[in-house]
Image (spheres, coloured by chain):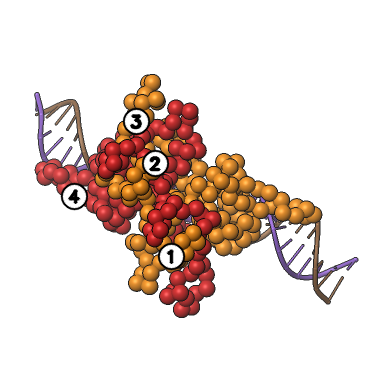
Chain colours: A red, B orange, C brown, D purple
Amino acid sequence: MRWKELSSQTCSLARTLAVIGDRWTLLVLREAFLRVRRFDDFQKRLGIARRVLTERLALLVEEGVLEKRPYQDRPVRHEYRLTQKGLDLYPALIALVHWGDKHYAGEDGPPLIHTHMACGQDFTPVTTCSECGEPVDPRDVRVRVNPALLAGRDDESAA
Amino acid sequence: MRWKELSSQTCSLARTLAVIGDRWTLLVLREAFLRVRRFDDFQKRLGIARRVLTERLALLVEEGVLEKRPYQDRPVRHEYRLTQKGLDLYPALIALVHWGDKHYAGEDGPPLIHTHMACGQDFTPVTTCSECGEPVDPRDVRVRVNPALLAGRDDESAA
DNA sequence: TGACTCCGTTCCATTTCAAGACTCATATAG
DNA sequence: CTATATGAGTCTTGAAATGGAACGGAGTCA
């Protein structure tokens, strides 16, 4: 299966990965969440090949995850900002970071500390159920194919 | 930056990606969460090259995300199961799936529906603050370098 | 004028990947 | 006992992605 074919799968995970599931893309997004916005800043901070960065940014813009807007004329310069769709990736990003913190941080603790300004405290992310508000344990989740899509296929896909 | 070098970064996201940030790895894990356990099942369901699958499974086992255990002798056959560390990836996985559902599902809705057995309802994941329990908006989060690690470096990294 | 900045492009050698054939040990069918 | 099947890989080979470094161009600074 070629990478591009992923996006044609029914599975939402596959579709997501087709957009952001690249080695570099998530690191680019990390920087974006840290408020990096310019080509050269991304490039320097990540040490990514310029050609690859150009490509990734273009894809993210095309997908509507980032938005390219001029921040000055003459010479026209653009910055790349997260759109709402991009901001929606935050739960995924922070969950990945949290996993790394939990399993790979040394005894001094995680590299970064996150503060929730709404309550003023340092926090870790907790995935809860939209319905009952309780934390979700994967063993308590059952999955079924959306009946509306059963008009033909009998595959499942997606976790 | 080579792929392997990622794991030597301070950033938790980079370290996480060094383990699971591969095109195929997350799809393998998706299947694992769907209770797929055998080499050939992974292979057939994903259409992944056998060599790549061998490699990915070996890495996941080495990292302690999956556990390889025999389920029969003569011929010895193994199955790959998620460890607790693997189960800990659930929040990240489901966040990625949810993003795909939200932004790429057609009008019939997402491919899969998740039911939270604890409360009996279909749900979507919500990322909340471990301290106040409220949903987290990325704009409400500030990040700072863990002071315990400041003995030298002044980099930030990690979203 | 010459140096410098930002944002890309182009080129090439190296690495990684995908596909599919091949291996090998054990089972089962006929 | 021969043929076929299954699980779990390994090998080969050509295609694609990557890293690195140089190049370009538009405009500013001094």
Taking the view exactly as shown, the residue that stands out farthest to the bottom is A151
* A28, B2: nearer the viewer: A28
According to the image, label 2 marks what residue?
A: A124
* Same subunit: marks 3 and 1: yes
How far apart in space, not on screen, are marks 3 and 1 (Cα)?
38 Å
Q: Secondary structure at mark 3?
A: strand
Q: Position of residue D12 (x, y in %)?
A: 63, 51
Q: Is residue B83 at least partly visible in the picture?
A: yes
Q: CA distance from mark 3 to mark 4?
A: 30 Å
Nearer the N terminus, badge 3 or badge 1? 1
Disc 1 designates what residue? B122
Residue marked by disc 4: A69
Q: Quadrant of the C terminus of chain B?
A: top left
C-alpha distance separating marks 1 and 4 = 39 Å
What amino acid type should be assigned to the residue bearing mark 1?
A: Asp
Q: Name the subunit of mark 4.
A: A
